[in-house]
Structures are given as structure tokens and as C-alpha cells.
Amino acid sequence: MLLGSMGFAQCLGEANVVGIAYGPAATDAFGTTVPQLTLVAREGEHLALAFEEFNTWVRQTDGDAIEITIVFRNAGGYVLALSQNLDRLRRRMLNGDTVYDAVFMSTTWFKSMDTVHPMLLKLREYCRHFPAPIVLGGAEYSPLRDGPLTKQMSVREVPAIVPVLKFELTFVDENDVAPGSIASAAIRTAGKGAPHESAEPTHPVKREKSAAAISATRVATIGRYFPVTIERLRRDPRFEALCGQLLVSGYARWQVEQAVCNFILASGVDLATRVSSRSDRELANDDDLSSMICDAVRNRYEMADGKELPVLPITVIAAHALADGVALLRATGNETPIASATELRAALESAGYADAVAATAVPVGTNRAPAM
């Protein structure tokens, strides 16, 4: 079992968050303003400690290491849930291993709000589009004068807080809440009445090793680390021609796109010396090589730089596809000797990968594969 941090929820509780503010925020990354969601607390020092932990996660993965879920209540108001994104937690703790079987547990912090600000509804609409960058920030609140007829307050920035740039925010209506989800826990917590603020453990999640689960993980991983490459593949007729040629040889589209991503990754890492003149078995047992590849994936950050896809030699891409398929079978306990694309296809179909989905077939703006 891998246990996620519990400290951030305690810090948020001690910060005494009293509200959520909305507004624009300037970002160096885009040179313009994007929406900002700001936690307003009475104790800025404790809020800063929570953000210090948030930014520790961010430095190891990205801003979406912080999972934000907003559940709109049928009776009015909403519940805000903050937790660790389990996929990023897995990446941080397992060093990029996407097949390792593990059980995770972490804590979710909840805050119930009695009313829904119109800006929050605008933020929900904004997040329907892709990409939808937002900033998570924090501020300190202190009342200046609080009387029966007049209420004045001061909200100021906390210098120690480093805002976080995110691209994922989940909005759910109470009627659409799925059992066992963070949103379900949010509704359950809100239903307890007081206090309006609480934290509870997220139920452990056991990673599946089924073909469908591994395929979905593969699509999500490619979409996260190779978003620009996938979009280029969608648009480049050379990729369609390459797929056409390799499909005849027995490879599926998802294998071709995976092979292209592997080829591009290898092009940026000096693997030639390490892999030359070595058998597949030797390479599979090379822990240093596995660590090098995981580090290369984890540290990969693609940007739309206007460049085109590199030349994709069909023989090299086919070799990558064959090696990747063999590695996939071995990772799931299948040691069947494979010598050709035809043999590989039969083994993959037997293992349940006949209907595996290609990332290039997933709609733009999502990294989730449809059910197999």
C-alpha cells in the first residue's frame, strides 16, 4: 500500500478557509490572464504551509497533481474537494511504472459553501473547452469591522504562497455523482451537517491488470506526456500512410502510435550505446535502463513549437512496435516467444487487446479511452 500525504488537509483545516474568491490572474506561461480560484482563509500562515506541500507535488509532476472537484448540491450551494490526484501520486511514488500493481490511500479535504457565485458558473462553462488553464491561489482574510448593519473586511495576498497553474477541474451535479467517487464522498460529508469543513481518507484504489485497464492507462499516459505529438499524428497524412503500411503487416493503429512515441522519446535520450548488440531479455532485465526511460518520460514536457514530425522510418517504427508488444505481454506474465508481427497480433488478441483504443482516436481535450 502507498500512502499519500495527510498533512495538507490538516494545514487547510488550521487555516480556517472561510470562502472562495474568483477573478483573473496574470500568468507568465501564457502572457495573458486566466481565471483564478482563490482559497480565502483567516490564518494565512497555515494556508501557506498547505500550498508549500501542493508545490512539492507540482515540482515532481505538474499542477494537476492537485485534484479539485466541485459538486453542486440539489438544495443549493456546493462542496469543494481538494485531494491528491492518484495518477500523479502513482507517478511520483512509482517512478513512472504504469503496470506495477499497488493500493493507494490518501486524504481529501472538503469545504461546503451555502451559495453559488455566478463567477463559478462561468468558470464551469470555461472549463468545458480545451485547453482551460486556471490558477489556484490563496489569500488571507481579516475582518476590519463586523456589526449588525455593516461588515467590512480585508483580503490580502500571502507572500509565501506560490499559486499553481492547472488544466483540469472537475464539476459534478449531485444527481450525476458516481458511487465511490470523490464527489460521492463530498456529498456524504456535506450531509453530515456541521462542520462545514472536514477531511476524510480516500478509499484505497487497487490497480487493475486487465487488458482494458492497461490500455486505458496507456492512452492516458501518451495523452499526458505526448499531447503535441498525438495532435501532430492526427493531422499529418504521413502518419496515416505509415499506419496503412503497418496495418497490412499485422500491427494495429495503437501499436503504431505507441511505436512513434517510443521512437521520438528514444531520439531525445542516448540509448543507442546501451541497447546495441543486446538481446531483448538482457534489455528487459536492465534496471538502470528501465530507470533511465522512466526518468525520460517523467521529465518530458511537450510544447507546440511549430515543428513538424520527424522522419519516421517504417523499419524502425516496426521494430519499436514489435519490441513494445513483446514487452507488454511479458509485463502481464506472457512469456510466449514472438518473432513476427503476425505472431504478436495473435498473442495480443488472445490476451484481450483486440479492441485496444488508439490515443489518436480519442476526442481532443480528453486523455480517457472509451470502454473496450
Image (spheres, rainbow, N blue to C red):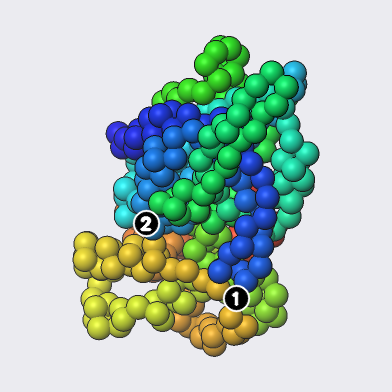
Q: Position of residue 173 (x, y in %)?
A: 72, 30
Question: Residue at 45% of width from left, 81% of height from top?
Answer: 316
* Circle 1: element type: loop
Q: Which residue is mark 2?
A: 60
Q: Which mark is residue 154?
A: none
Question: Residue at 68% of width from left, 23% of height from top?
Answer: 114
Count of numbered circles on the image = 2
* Horizontal side, residue 179 vs residue 122: left or right: left
**Image quadrant containing the C terminus:** top right
| 191 over 212 or under it: above or below | above
**Image quadrant containing the N terminus:** top left
| 80 over 277 or under it: above or below | above
Give the quadrant of residue 202. top left
Using the numbered discs, state the Cα–Cα distance from disc 1 to disc 2 in whole angstroms: 22 Å
Q: Position of residue 37 (x, y in %)?
A: 61, 46
* Circle 2: element type: helix
Question: Residue at 66% of width from left, 62% of height from top?
Answer: 33
Q: Which residue is mark 1?
A: 304
* Horizontal side, residue 2 vs residue 77: left or right: left
Give the quadrant of residue 122. top right
Question: Residue at 60% of width from left, 29% of height from top?
Answer: 145
* Horizontal side, residue 251 vs residue 12: left or right: right
Question: Can residue 232 be seen from the camera position used here?
Answer: yes
Q: Position of residue 321 (x, y in %)?
A: 47, 69
Precedes in sequence: disc 1 or disc 2: 2
| 68 over 266 or under it: above or below | above
